[in-house]
Image (cartoon, rainbow, N blue to C red):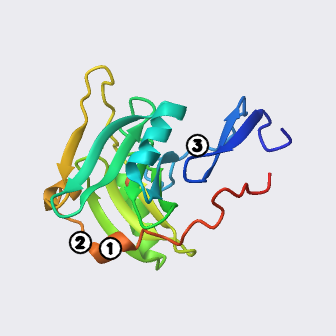
Amino acid sequence: MKTPGGGYGFRFFDVDGRTVEVSADVRARRHRRVEEKESVPVRLSHVVLNSPDLDRTRAWYERHLGFALSDTLSSPHMGEVMHFMRISSQHHSMALAKGPHTSLHHVSFEMRGIDEYMRGSGRVMRAGFRKVWGPGRHVAGDNTFTYFLDPHGNTVEYTTELEELDEDTWHPHVYDFSQPEVTDQWGTANPMNELIAKESFNDIDRSCFVAPPV
Ligand SMILES: [Fe+2]
């Protein structure tokens, strides 16, 4: 491929019409060393997708791409609203959120530990971007979170210390997210409510079943 890093790949639509791209043999980009206490994300942690039919999308990713369910968020009032999906021992690389339409929920960037995560969160706040939710620490995945809106209205997250689990012995939990300590173990985040949840519904993905240019 004549793209940065070379290699080869192919693309296909998932059950909701998102374009999924698989790349192989791509050369790693050279990068400088990130110094201690620099608030620079070191890798993509996970992506969360809004889906109008959670179980249909979950079944598709399990069957066609080998994902497995790690945990589910549910409440007596709303039923199941999020499935955390793994493709390795990392608790989730993807999650599916119940949304009104097919769209992006959020993209999460991994920081190296609590200090760099807090420094990064503070840097974004000082730069004047709107903090939607956080800082806090989820039960599902045990990871920390601060969510912001980017200039295009997409939600982005800084996180660290996402749980590594033993895939041979793991049994998925169903957590009741109406309990505040489920969404935030620490109690430092602003309380989750319907208005905050709606910030991540995003606009409907207009490129469903339309392949973007190569
Ligand atoms: Fe996240």
Residue type, label 3: Arg
Disc 1: CA contacts within 10 A as few (<14), some (14-19) or many (>=20): few
Residue 66's spot in the image, x, y percent? 49, 30
Q: Quadrant of ligand 1?
A: bottom left
Q: Which mark is residue 196?
A: 1
The residue that mark 2 highlights is 190
Residue type, label 2: Asn
Residue 42's spot in the image, x, y percent? 52, 46
Pointer 3 or 1: first along the chain: 3
| Above or below, 156 relative to 43 | below
Pointer 3 or 2: first along the chain: 3
**Quarter-of-image position of residue 152:** bottom right
The residue that mark 3 highlights is 33
**Quarter-of-image position of residue 193:** bottom left
Residue at image x 81%, y 44%?
3
Q: Nearer the viewer, residue 190 or 197?
A: 197
Q: Which mark is residue 63?
A: none
Q: Residue furthest top?
A: 168
